[in-house]
Image: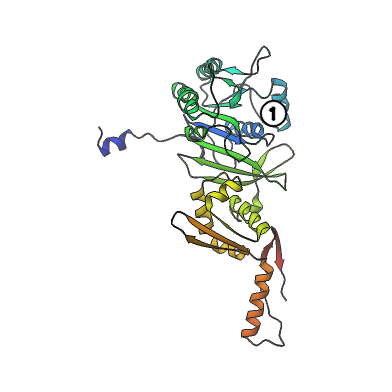
Amino acid sequence: MKTIEELKNSIVDINYIIENMIRENGLYCLLGEAKVGKSALALQIANSVCNGIPFLNLKTNKTPILYLSTEMNPYETISRINFMKCNLMENDFLYTFPEDNMTQLSILKVEKEISEFKEKYNGKLVFIDMFNGINFGNYYDLNNYQDMSQNIFPQLRKLCNNYNVTIIIVHHLNRKGKSLGSTAIDTCVDGKIALKQDENIKSTFYLNYESRDYQALNYVLKRNDNLILSIDEKTEETLNPNLIQFLKYAISKKEFTFTISEMVSKLNLFITPPVLGKLISSNKDELEKLGLFIECKRTQTERLYTAKYREPLEILADNIFSESNSNNLNSKEPKMNGQKMVVNGFFMTMLRI
């Protein structure tokens, strides 16, 4: 039993590896669909932390990296590093892969590598690429909550605590945009970094971050020819990327009813229903400017939303017509200030008329 003062005095400030994203002595999951570029993102994060340079404008604390790969052999890894033009120095980036034609690393081998890494280099960040490439010593079912929560993840958490390292495991998303396997994977980690590629613009990506320790982060990213992701400056002042996906869906449907949970599931969003609900509520005025009008009715069991989309030009025409009638401007053309509108996802500037 402790008093409130004793609790306050026992709190230790959390040191970060990536500011507002990755803390020391934490367990995280980097998620994405097959071939989306999960390993490239992991190497980009490693390069930022090794050199103490910002990652997506977030500060980093420089530390050596241990990269345990079951996906890429040494030749493939070096080729990828060179292609991405990463500046990884000998004593800052340590690499391990399965030997003797093995396809997995045993958890005992993982611990041995982490122990040596900590003793020789005092590093604080470990990547495991991929999660399903680790042999945990006994049979387990990826889809079984008990196996994941009581057997597998406690072993990883123990490594974090025993060696004071942060572990980022790279793992797949399923077709519904959730972690492949049991929901325990989501609940047992301290945070998730989820990467998704735009279905239409292949150079555009969405990164969503959720954590127990920091606020959620959402980015619209662009990828250059060297596979490096950066914040798309054109979208910094626009809608949240999850709302952009919702707006695209609304444009295609024109009019529909939905619940927030249904929409998160249907669009494979990386956020929780309450977060989407808050986004829609707080951006209602902006959505209406873009032509999307949403009404909410509370039933006995849930909130039911009705969405109606109208082309912004239709709304603009109605406003002009209404203004013309109210001012009896039979012979004068209405004047407009130049303003930007969005029609079917494309920005256009309305000229003076």
In this view, 79 is above or below 213: above
Regarding residue 11, the answer to whether it shows in the image is yes
Q: Pick the residue in front: 5 or 89.
A: 5
In this view, 16 is above or below 203: above
Quadrant where the C terminus sits is: bottom right
Quadrant where the N terminus sits is: top left
Q: Residue furthest front?
A: 300
Query: Is label 1 in a helix, a strand or a loop?
Result: helix
Q: Residue furthest top?
A: 100
At label 1, the amino acid type is Ile
* Residue 229 x/y as whole percent: 66, 40
* Residue 252 x/y as whole percent: 68, 57
Regarding residue 54, the answer to whether it shows in the image is no
At 58% from the left and 33% from the top, the residue drawn is 180
* Residue 29 x/y as whole percent: 55, 33
At 54% from the left and 41% from the top, the residue drawn is 209
| Residue 72 falls left or right of residue 124 | right
Give the number of marks.
Answer: 1
| Residue 193 falls left or right of residue 342 | left
* Residue 100 x/y as whole percent: 67, 11
Label 1: few (<14), some (14–19) or many (≥20) C-alpha neighbours in 10 Å? some
Q: Pick the residue in front: 119 or 174.
A: 174
**Image quadrant where residue 130 sits:** top right
In this view, 238 is above or below 313: above
Q: Which residue lies under the disc numbered 1?
A: 81
Q: How is the image coloured?
A: rainbow
